[in-house]
Image (tube, grey):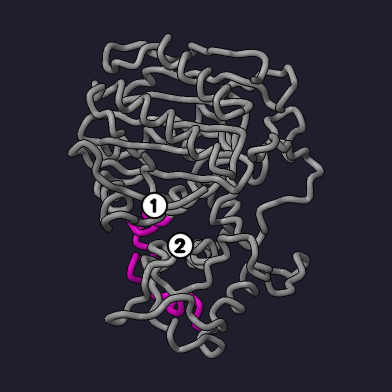
């Protein structure tokens, strides 16, 4: 069963137990987790998979198996970088909520209140678009999600290429219709470029510096913007899995997430740090104030049904959950957070795209969830 509304036999194995508390708080055992990761890798041809099971206080289980590159021997580790794709949108949401709590901006701030100089060049349909509309993908902005849209010709040597891209976006016809004064939902990567620009303007820092300030300076996590093997060729390489083969993407490969869409999903974190990041949400949703207030976590995760502020949510087995999925094609990342049950999981893979990868992450998710909640009898899941 797929949790979210969208998205997209290797030698060696490594299991790390550093900083892991094997508690009696889950029915998922180390042996069971190891077994299903092995099965998923073999069944779906995924080079490496990392899984973390946690509550708000402890990392209950954490394991990584597989290799950094398909058909190679070097094992992936919990300290390697994995690309998190659109899970980066939840990071941007935390930054936004932090600035809201610091009273530097509000969720109802209009885009053109922050960029009044762009108002004359915009279509009138966009004049009332707010920060929240952009995070909800209810701003009518062109999606740039298929990889087939044509970008305007903008030189990266331009002083602010993403601002030039925004000028182009607000001059385009809306991608969705308006109903009762609001645009209909359409998942849009470009929408987050505009949201990020609003945050950049009110604090005087670019997206890259905002992310590093939050994740590295304030939360002590290492982050890289871009593919892991662009940072270092010894890091995990991305892969695309098709019915016929597993395609590997070396550092020099021309496929990159466009710079103009960086705020929508181009971050890389290690499984250790990504688990800590997921745990921050669980702590907040359990009532703890940390990077932002507990009310802030509740708002960005659950203020809107189905798809909130860059974060999906729903109900399974009578339990509310929030979730992030991310894949820019060559990696896959997922978090599932169930605050009522004080439970969360994080899954990272160095393969993306194609039905096989989604099937792998869905299969692992349901195996873990059913085991944890003892839902053996829910044969339909």
In the image, the segment drawn in magenta is: 96-116
Residue picked out by circle 2: 187
Q: Secondary structure at mark 2?
A: loop
In the rendered image, is residue 186 in sight? yes
Residue 80 forms part of the magenta stretch: no
The answer to whether 122 is drawn above or below residue 341 in the figure is below
Residue that extends furthest to the right in the rendered view of this protein: 252
As drawn, is 170 to the left or to the right of 126? right
Residue that extends furthest to the left in the rendered view of this protein: 318
Residue picked out by circle 1: 5
Residue 112 forms part of the magenta stretch: yes
The structure residue drawn at horizontal position 59% and vertical position 13%, both measured from the top left corner, is 14
Q: Viewer-nearest of labels 1 and 2?
A: 1
In the rendered image, is residue 56 in sight? no
Q: Nearer the viewer, residue 102 or 10?
A: 10
Classify mark 1: residues with Cα within 10 Å, few (<14), some (14-19) or many (20+): few
Q: Quadrant of residue 260?
A: bottom right
| Labels 1 and 2: the sequence-earlier one | 1
The structure residue drawn at horizontal position 23% and vertical position 42%, both measured from the top left corner, is 320
Q: Nearer the viewer, residue 198 or 74?
A: 74
Q: Position of residue 91 (x, y in %)?
A: 46, 48
As drawn, is 217 to the left or to the right of 1? right
The structure residue drawn at horizontal position 29% and vertical position 39%, both measured from the top left corner, is 284
Image quarter hosting the N terminus:
top left
Image quarter hosting the C terminus:
top left
Q: Quadrant of residue 353?
A: top right
Q: Secondary structure at mark 1?
A: loop
Q: Are marks 1 and 2 in contact (CB under 8 Å)?
A: yes
Q: Position of residue 116 (x, y in %)?
A: 49, 82
In the drawing, what numbered circle is on residue 378?
A: none
């Amino acid at each position: 069963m797929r949790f979210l509304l969208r998205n997209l036999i290797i030698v060696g194995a490594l299991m790390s137990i550093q900083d892991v508390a094997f508690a009696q708080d889950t029915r998922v055992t180390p042996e069971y987790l190891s077994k299903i990761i092995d099965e998923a890798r073999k069944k779906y041809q995924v080079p490496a998979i990392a899984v973390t099971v946690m509550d708000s206080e402890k990392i209950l289980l954490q394991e990584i198996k597989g290799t950094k590159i398909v058909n190679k021997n070097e094992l992936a580790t919990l300290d390697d970088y994995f690309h998190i794709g659109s899970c980066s949108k939840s990071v941007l949401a935390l930054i936004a909520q932090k600035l809201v709590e610091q009273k530097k901006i509000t969720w109802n701030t209009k885009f053109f209140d922050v960029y009044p100089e762009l108002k004359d060049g915009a279509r009138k349909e966009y004049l009332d678009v707010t920060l929240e509309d952009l995070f909800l993908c209810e701003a009518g902005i062109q999606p740039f999600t298929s990889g087939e849209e044509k970008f305007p010709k903008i030189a990266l040597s331009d002083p602010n290429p993403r601002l030039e891209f925004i000028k182009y976006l607000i001059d385009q016809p809306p991608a969705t219709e308006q109903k009762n004064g609001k645009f209909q939902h359409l998942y849009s990567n470009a929408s987050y470029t505009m949201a990020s620009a609003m945050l950049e303007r009110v604090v005087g820092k670019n997206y890259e510096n905002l992310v590093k300030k939050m994740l590295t300076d304030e939360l002590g996590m290492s982050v890289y913007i871009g593919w892991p093997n662009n940072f270092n060729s010894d890091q995990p390489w991305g892969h695309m899995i098709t019915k016929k083969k597993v395609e590997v993407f070396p550092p020099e490969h021309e496929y990159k997430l466009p710079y103009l869409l960086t705020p929508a999903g181009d971050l890389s974190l290690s499984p250790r740090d990504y688990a800590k990041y997921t745990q921050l949400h669980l702590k907040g949703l359990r009532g703890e104030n940390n990077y932002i207030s507990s009310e802030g976590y509740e708002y960005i995760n659950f203020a809107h049904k189905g798809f909130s502020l860059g974060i999906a949510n729903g109900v399974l087995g009578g339990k509310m959950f929030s979730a992030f999925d991310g894949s820019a094609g060559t990696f896959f990342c997922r978090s599932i957070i169930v605050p009522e049950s004080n439970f969360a999981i994080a899954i990272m893979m160095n393969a993306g795209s194609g039905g096989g990868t989604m099937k792998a992450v869905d299969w692992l998710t349901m195996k873990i969830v059913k085991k944890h909640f003892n839902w053996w009898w829910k044969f339909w899941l």
